[in-house]
Image (cartoon, helix red, strand yellow):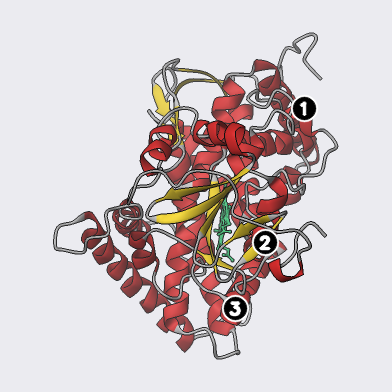
Amino acid sequence: SILTHPRRSRRPVGLPLGSLGWPVVGETLEFLSAAYSSRPESFMDLRRALYGKVFKSHLFGSPTIVSTDAEVSRFVLQSDARAFVPSYPKSLLELLGKSSILRLNGALHRRVHGLVGAFFKSPLLKSQITADMQSHVERAMATWPEGRPVLIQDQAKHLVFPVLVKGLIGLEPGEKVGFLKKQFREFIAGLMSFPLKLPYTRLYKSLQAKRSMVRFVREIIDEKRRNPSPRPSDVVDVLVNDTSGQITDDVISDNIIDLMIPAEDSVPVLLTLAVKYLTDNPPALHQVEEENMALKERKAEVGLCLEWKDYMSLSFTQDVITETLRLGNIIGGIMRKAARDVEVKGHLIPEGWCVFTYFRSVHLDDSVYDDSLRFNPWRWKGKETNAYSFTPFGGGQRLCPGLDLARLEASIFLHHLVTTFTWVADDDDEVVNFPTVRMKKGLPVRLMRKTNACCLTPIANVQA
Ligand code: HEM
């Protein structure tokens, strides 16, 4: 095997090549200056050319092995806590809380991941999310103005957050969701802040917001503990019903709040980037329209509503989402810390060092994806999405349990958007990559309502 422990290795292994940069700051400033540019991977590209796909560096206060090699990253993700544990900046650890799934290891991690993952896969939740998302999207889109700019990114957040929050805590849209959203925004503003907890600092305000969310979630937990529901309809039900004795109120409240992060951030960004890439690629947009109109008409003929399986069966739309995940790199990479010396593919990762598996460099590697910077959903036709070289949702024990839900919400949003509107986007918006991926101006578009949505004129020679 290419992946062995040092003691069993036949040839000497050493640290990968690379530079630890300046004292204290290491190469953090070079990393950040690339991260804030339109080509964050340029930091990696330069070093890959000098040292190879796996190299050493010093980032955010820690000696770090950077992996832009799909096999090495896969190995890191597949390893358990005996080899690698999650590693996050101090401010983030503080805000996530000790029982956060992102920090847990071992048996409790497996339990929480298993419970949440199984519930997110359940047809019951998928049906509920579909019904809720559909009615939200239809109601919201009915109010979107024509001809005046609509910010797709903000609209996507408005739509996704309440739908996922209902799946998490059972809260119906309304005032309380508004309160939660306000607190939550305060909370996430501090995730990447300076780790100083004095009054009025960013971190302090975020911790206060978290406390008020915990109180709010605790009331819901108490209520559900008093009246447990035999048929769980949200994540709190699932966790409250667990009989292992491991799932305390702290575990539930920390994790419920974690689970809101993708609802405010990753999923809305996925929706937004899909709209951006489609806007820039008329043949792809046209094919998505055709596929979705055909489904809509088929369902209308037999008088049935769309169900989650209908959305997931739209193969080209799914390929568009896959390609958006590849090109958008919403989570560019993941940090772990080595719990012992580990050897991977001839490289030593010393105990206590961080390892940064940088997916973006793999997703944008021309030797893996032909013409990798081009949005080309046709490249996925008939292809599996579980290759080493495609890891937008991570992998191994911590593979994102929300991946189906993210795809489902994106499909529902795109379906309603392309069957209701045509649009033009303002030219001068751009993707920002750091600290989180998003559109700088929120992707303003001017919408035109389709008058007779059934009468699309086919465009000749659409790329296939
Ligand atoms: C486009 C949308 C999303 C992207 C790109 C994304 C990406 C990821 C990635 C890369 C990881 C791995 C983190 C690691 O290994 O340390 C992860 C983990 C996770 N994601 Fe997502 N995610 C998305 C949506 C969601 C949604 C909708 C949910 C649920 C509401 C969710 C819940 C989680 C949870 C709970 C984990 C932690 C799993 C664990 O550590 O065991 N994600 N996600």
Q: Residue at x 65, y 59 (%)?
A: 76
Quarter of image, ligand 1: bottom right
The image quadrant that residue 299 belongs to is: top right
Q: In this view, does 380 lie to the left or right of 400?
A: right
Evaluate whether residue 127 shows in this view.
no
Quadrant where the N terminus is found in the figure: bottom right
The mark nearer the N terminus, 3 or 2, is 3
Q: Which of 78 and 47 is in front in this view?
A: 47
Q: Residue at x 67, y 32 (%)?
A: 365
Which residue is under mark 1? 378
Establish if 61 lies above or below 436.
below
Judge depth for marks 1 and 3 and give the one in front: 3
Q: Nearer the viewer, residue 360 or 461?
A: 360
Q: Distance between the residues labelled 3 and 2?
A: 22 Å
Beta carbon of the mark 1 residue lies under 8 A of ligand 1: no
Q: What residue type is labelled 2?
A: Glu
Instruction: Give coordinates of residue 421: x percent, y percent.
Output: 56, 24
Cβ atoms at labels 1 and 3 below 8 Å apart: no
Judge depth for marks 3 and 2 and give the one in front: 2
Q: Give the farthest residue toward the front.
A: 12
Question: How dense is the environment of label 3, judged by Cα within 10 Å: few (below 14), some, or many (20 and up)?
Answer: few
Q: In this view, does 318 lie to the left or right of 39?
A: right
Which residue is under mark 2? 343
The mark nearer the N terminus, 2 or 1, is 2
